[in-house]
Amino acid sequence: MKVLVTDPIADAGLERLRDAGHEVETAYDVEGEALLSAVSDANALIVRSGTEVTDEVFEAATELVIVGRAGIGVDNIDIEAATEHGVIVANAPEGNVRAAAEHTVAMAFATVRSIPQAHIRLRDGEWAKSEFVGTELNGKTLGIVGLGRVGQEVAKRLDSLGMELVVYDPYISQERAAQFNAELVGELEECLERADVVTVHTPLLPETRGMIGAEELELLEGGYLVNCARGGIVDEEALAAAVEDGTLAGAAIDVFETEPVPADSTLLSVDDVVVTPHLGASTEAAQENVAVDTAKQVLAAFRGEPVANA
Ligand code: NAD
Ligand code: MLT
């Protein structure tokens, strides 16, 4: 069988497929006609978030059995088209959860203590100590939007740092929230109003696209917003404006509406917005986990066995 891999994954996953006797072709960053041609005889396609797996790709991929997503979000895969073409879509829902949670916590600290901004000033030769008086997380309220796998790991970590936890997630129970020492609220607005720091952990869905815009950001007045989930959940223009005009004290963003983020994106030019290039899952452990999990799913699909999914 031929496995086409179009976004870089850890060698451990590639080796597992080769050891099982399959041909593995890596073609990173291919798009357009080159992607359609590469996928035309593939039996499996493995991607991360870089490859858009559209209806056109499924049309071209006449031999395709499975698309493996070496990570969590499947928003770059047209699931409806996959279903129409009888192709399995399997993600790796567990392997990078702790990495994503740790990055969220790191980004929360980065913004409330202005770590990147202070770093740049010091590297430029300025000892700007008096300009960087930060906010302590201890005793503040954390608003968690989406208490799924990543949200829960963030809750555990920030609870242990002495934060009060308020959660908005319409699909979980009060009992579930209580297991994480968190109070579940019924409205996003209440979560934003009560929080000093908000972290976002929902999938990108039609329902969550743009769910935090200018009006919602006003409710978080004076606070900080961290998004390591998906670009498009938070309105980028509104966020940039809210930080620029002082409605928010700061923000930390790992994910963008367009990736790679264009150099002229407004968010990149706002001093109190800390940015990273979609690094949430970028640890060696996480990448090895998701690569191996994805390889196992592809092998299961080739054997006609059930494929575990999120
Ligand atoms: P999950 O499916 O386990 O949890 C998502 C949670 O969001 C669920 O509890 C769900 O009930 C909740 N939710 C759904 N719709 C909602 C809404 N309208 N309002 C509030 N809550 C809602 O997902 P996860 O594994 O925790 O991943 C969370 C996000 O993090 C995803 O977008 C994923 O793609 C992203 N992610 C990013 C990185 C990265 O590299 N930055 C790494 C891993 C995951
Ligand atoms: C994910 O959804 O798992 C993340 O986007 C991580 C990634 O693959 O970069």
Image (spheres, rainbow, N blue to C red):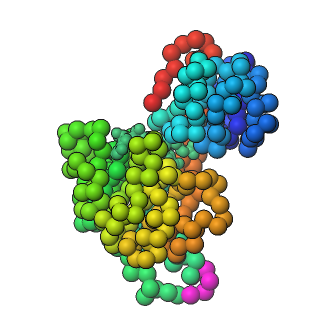
Q: Is residue 5 above or below residue 118?
A: above
Whether residue 162 is visible: no
The image shows residue 17, relative to residue 279, as above or below, that is above
User: Horizontal placement of 264 versus 280: left or right?
Assistant: right
Which residue occupies 48% across, 26% down?
309
Which residue is pictured at 64% across the width and 39% down the height?
Answer: 52
Task: Kindly report the secondary structure that dominates the magenta region of the rendered protein.
Answer: loop
Q: Which residues are magenta?
A: 122-126
- Work out whether residue 24 or residue 265 is closer to the camera in this orientation and state it: 265
Picture coordinates of residue 268, whole percent (x, y): 58, 68
Residue 303 position in % (x across, y down): 61, 12
Q: Quadrant of the N terminus?
A: top right
**In the rendered view, does 21 fall on the left or right side of 71?**
right
Q: Nearer the viewer, residue 98 or 63?
A: 63
- Ligand 2 location (quadrant): top right
Question: Is 184 covered by the magenta stretch?
Answer: no
Q: Can residue 176 be seen? A: yes
Q: Residue at x 53, y 73 (%)?
A: 270
User: In the rendered picture of this protein, how many numbered marks are placed on residues?
Assistant: 0
Which quadrant is home to the C terminus? Answer: top left
Query: Residue 148's spot in the image, x, y percent?
Result: 36, 41
Coordinates of residue 226 in the picture (x, y in percent): 43, 59
Residue closest to the eye, 199 or 297? 199
Q: Residue 97 sits in which quadrant? A: top left
Q: Residue at x 55, y 55 (%)?
A: 256
